Image (spheres, grey):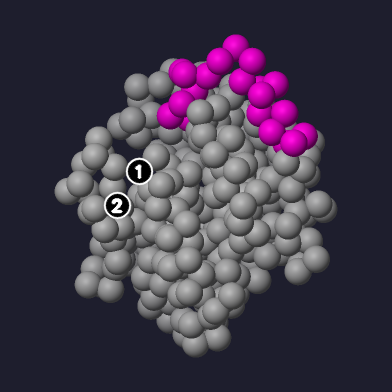
Amino acid sequence: MSQVGGMRLFDAHCHLQDPRIAAVAPRLIRTAIDSGVVRFSVNGVSEKDWHVVKQMSDQYPSIIPSFGLHPWYVAERSPNWFDTLRGFFVDTPYAAVGEIGIDKGSHGKTIEYTEQVEVFQRQLELAKELQRPVSVHCVRAFGDLLEILKQMGPFPAGVILHSYMGSAEMVPELSELGSYFSFSGFLTSMKEQKAKKMLKSVPKDRILIETDAPDGLSNFNKESLIPVPREDIPDEEDKSAFLNHPANIHNVLEYVSLLLEMPKEEVAEVSYQNAVRLFSYPGSKLQSEG
């Protein structure tokens, strides 16, 4: 695997199985690996895509699979969704848990919140039982998230707060419970001073970076971004939309490094080592590397 300038990067959260980019995922993976991205954590979001994540993971050693029911898809779950989910962990013993969570944002408000919480808690229990890291989605519900994690934690296998945009003040308590803080291009939508304060409050050994591809395209240094070519977007999708992909993690790295006032190489290595440690649970693909 080639590395740019010796840097190794780990995309701690993305969705290569997303229908908008799944067909060109092999090319996107090659492009990312050529740019120094050594590993990808690919997160399933519903019963409809868990099998695609598993297939990709079976095909690519660089992909760490995660299976979970995302809050946006809670209303669509089948009566036996939890048994199906358990089955994926039996068939894929090296998988992590995610993406799961709670959401009170514009989209989340359309989904019954008590059901979101119930589904979230069941999957947190599963992550604890399996002793696996869990990737968590949280939008405008950080107070609730902290209370749930306090009630159910700590989580020694790790909680990945993906695309973290919570406050600096919450970082210490979340850290004590086992949280890692993963930053994507969405960070650029925060006010810079608030983002800087929050980033500097995160312990170095808990920093991760991600793309959240095909979403999460950064607003920073846009000319350096490489969107998915329009001709590669399926006909039924909006070709005017810019889709993200893992090679753009370099843009996230640049922005995080700027706010932390640390060399890019140092942030790259710190976040890479953190991700390797987190994903080196017993039976994982990374266990030997960790």
Label 1 vs label 2, nearer the camera:
2
Where does label 2 land, which residue?
A: 232
Amino acid type indicated by mark 2: Asp
- Which segment is the magenta one? 71-91
Please, is residue 40 above or below residue 159 in the view? below
Residue 147 in picture, x, y percent from top left: 59, 36
Disc 1 marks which residue? Answer: 20
Q: Is residue 267 above or below residue 55?
A: below
Give yes or no for residue 87 being in the magenta stretch. yes
Q: Nearer the viewer, residue 172 or 229?
A: 229
Q: Is residue 128 magenta?
A: no
Q: Main secondary structure of the magenta part?
A: helix
Question: Which residue is found at the position 51% from the left and 28% from the top?
Answer: 48
Which of these two is toward me, 12 or 38? 38
- Which numbered disc covers residue 46? none
The picture places residue 236, in percent across and down from the top left corner, at: 25, 35
Residue at 40% in and 21% down? 111
**In the displayed structure, would residue 286 be above or below residue 77?**
below
Residue type of the residue flagged with mark 1:
Arg
